[in-house]
Amino acid sequence: MQEVTATRYITPLREGGSLPGLVEGDDLGTYVLKFTGAGQGRKTLVAEVVCGELARRLGFRVPRLVTVELDPVLGLGEPDQQVQELLRSSGGTNLGMEFLSGALGFDPLAFGVDAREAGRIVWFDALVNNVDRSWRNPNLLVLRGDLWLIDHGATMIWHHNWPGAETSAGRPYDVAEHALASFGPDTATAAAELAPLVTEELLAEVTAAVPDVWLSGEPGFDTPDDLRRAYAAPLLARAAVIHERIGGIR
């Protein structure tokens, strides 16, 4: 991923619980910044990178991800005490998601999705066990008629308990409340197209994008590369069978 230094803190974004912020980088790009000091911690950022970059390589539209070096002094003019505390606790390497100017939040009543595209997205969410793409909170944007996938921090929940990861990753995926469940998602076709693409090589490439600083010091793992392989293993196993374990399609 490209490395960017934040040059200006623009404004907090209050749509999500983690209170991301809008920043300008030294490349003159504008990014939605996800903070290492947020309550969910660095594992959320790891999930964003692994799942976001995997989705991109599987052909989904995902905003460009960058690492953003943050100097906490940028937030000194922010009047909100909560935001100041978040900035102070997030000095160093954070995650930036390219801001999609003009994009609108997905509304299933106003925007139709064909069965093939719905199936691809549902299959991918089942692969990474995304529990945060519901009709209440789709985490989908529409830009010039195209769907974009955002916010993958609530995925791969097994990485919050590595000793139980194998059992957790083997569980089925219920799409009853998925944002696209009502569009007749064709997950069988999606599995045939996408599962063969999820290889050890691809997952090694994706996990290599995660900065060492977000992986170091994880209990039970000697090196960041050991942890990268632990992230890849459940995804590789899940890709081959998850289409058989998707329930709740209407």
Image (cartoon, rainbow, N blue to C red):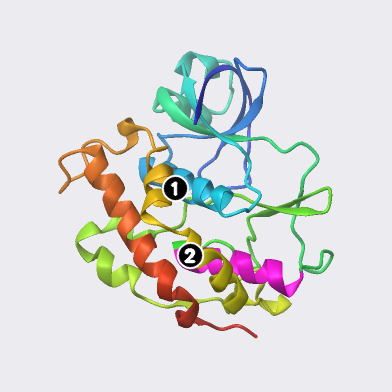
Disc 1 marks a residue whose amino acid type is: Val
**Is residue 178 part of the magenta span, yes or no?**
no
What residue is rendered at 42% in x and 26% in y?
93
Residue position marked by numbered label 1 in the rendering: 50
What residue is rendered at 66% in x and 27% in y?
30
Query: How would you classify the magenta stretch by its main secondary structure?
Result: helix
When the figure is inspected, residue 15 is found, relative to residue 138, above or below; the finding is above
Check if mark 2's residue and mark 1's residue have beta carbons within 8 Å: no
Within 10 Å of disc 2 (Cα), the crowding (few <14, some 14-19, many 20+) is few
Can you see residue 69?
Answer: yes
- In what element is the residue under mark 2? helix
* Position of residue 53 measured from the top left corner of the image (x, y, whole percent): 51, 45
Q: Nearer the viewer, residue 81 or 245?
A: 245
Image: magenta residue range: 114-127
What residue is rendered at 53% in x and 16% in y?
74
Disc 2 marks a residue whose amino acid type is: Pro
When the figure is inspected, residue 239 is found, relative to residue 36, above or below; the finding is below
Q: Which quarter of the picture shows residue 58?
A: bottom right
Q: CA distance from mark 2 to mark 1?
A: 18 Å
Q: Nearer the viewer, residue 90 or 67?
A: 67
Within 10 Å of disc 1 (Cα), the crowding (few <14, some 14-19, many 20+) is many
Mark in the foreground, 2 or 1 = 2
Q: Nearer the viewer, residue 62 or 17?
A: 62
Can you see residue 151?
Answer: no
* Position of residue 178 measured from the top left corner of the image (x, y, whole percent): 60, 71
Q: Would you say 64 lies left or right of 170 here? A: right
Looking at the rendered structure, which numbered label has been put on residue 196? 2
* Position of residue 155 measured from the top left corner of the image (x, y, whole percent): 45, 58
Q: Would you say 157 lies left or right of 217 here? A: right
Q: Which quarter of the picture shows residue 238?
A: bottom left
